[in-house]
Amino acid sequence: QVQLAESGGGLVQPGGSLRLSCAASGRIFNVNDMGWYRQAPGKQRELVAVISSGGRTNYADAVQGRFTISRDNAKNTVYLQMNSLKPEDTAVYYCNANVRDWRPYNVDYWGQGTQVTVSS
């Protein structure tokens, strides 16, 4: 099995910064795309940012220029640096990884979610 362990959420004032981390572990042959999604109360889960194994990135318009996604392939870890946070960034943030595990196909795994609250 594969586990995704997230850390770094919390309470921050508007304009502040937070850094999320997510480490994949277990029976991993290869990790493909890794990304972050978020879900605010009463809303659907939405893509925040994604990064390929080669470092190609894609961001939601709402976070472009404020958030930076990066990864350490040696550690199977993805990061999300969040700057200039706004109250509308408040949500549960979920890590996602597309993984080739022991099976002959890729599988999407999810973290348990970490709460980010932006409030004064």
Image: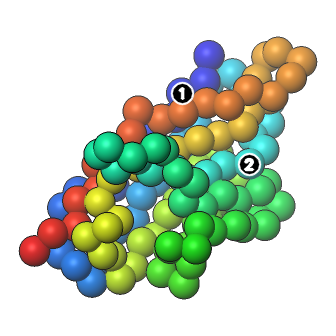
Q: Is residue 16 above or below residue 93?
A: below
- Horizontal placement of 112 versus 70: left or right? left
Instruction: Name the residue tied to disc 1.
Output: 3
Tell me what residue is drawn at x 46 percent, y 44 percent.
44
Residue 48 picture location, percent across and down = 54, 60
Residue 37 picture location, percent across and down = 51, 50
The answer to whether residue 97 is seen in the rendering is yes
Q: Is residue 99 above or below residue 43?
A: above
Q: What kind of residue is marked 2?
A: Asp
Of 56 and 102, nearer the camera is 56
Are the residues tagged 2 and 1 within 8 Å (C-beta)? no
**Secondary element at image label 2:** strand
Quarter occupied by residue 72:
bottom right
Extreme residue toward the left, this view: 120
**Secondary element at image label 1:** strand
- Horizontal placement of 66 versus 76: left or right? left
- Which class describes the residues within 10 Å of circle 1: few (<14), some (14-19), or many (20+)? some
Q: Which mark is residue 33?
A: 2
Residue 87 picture location, percent across and down = 25, 70
N-terminal-most mark, 2 or 1? 1
Quarter occupied by residue 32:
top right
> Of circles 2 and 1, which is in front?
2
Q: Is residue 89 above or below residue 114?
A: below
Tell me what residue is drawn at x 73 percent, y 26 percent.
107
Q: Is residue 67 above or below residue 50?
A: below
Q: What kind of residue is marked 1?
A: Gln
- Horizontal placement of 76 versus 87: left or right? right
Extreme residue toward the right, this view: 104
Tell me what residue is drawn at x 30 percent, y 75 percent.
86
**Mark 2–mark 1 distance (CA, rounded to whole Å):** 15 Å
| Quarter that holds the N terminus | top right
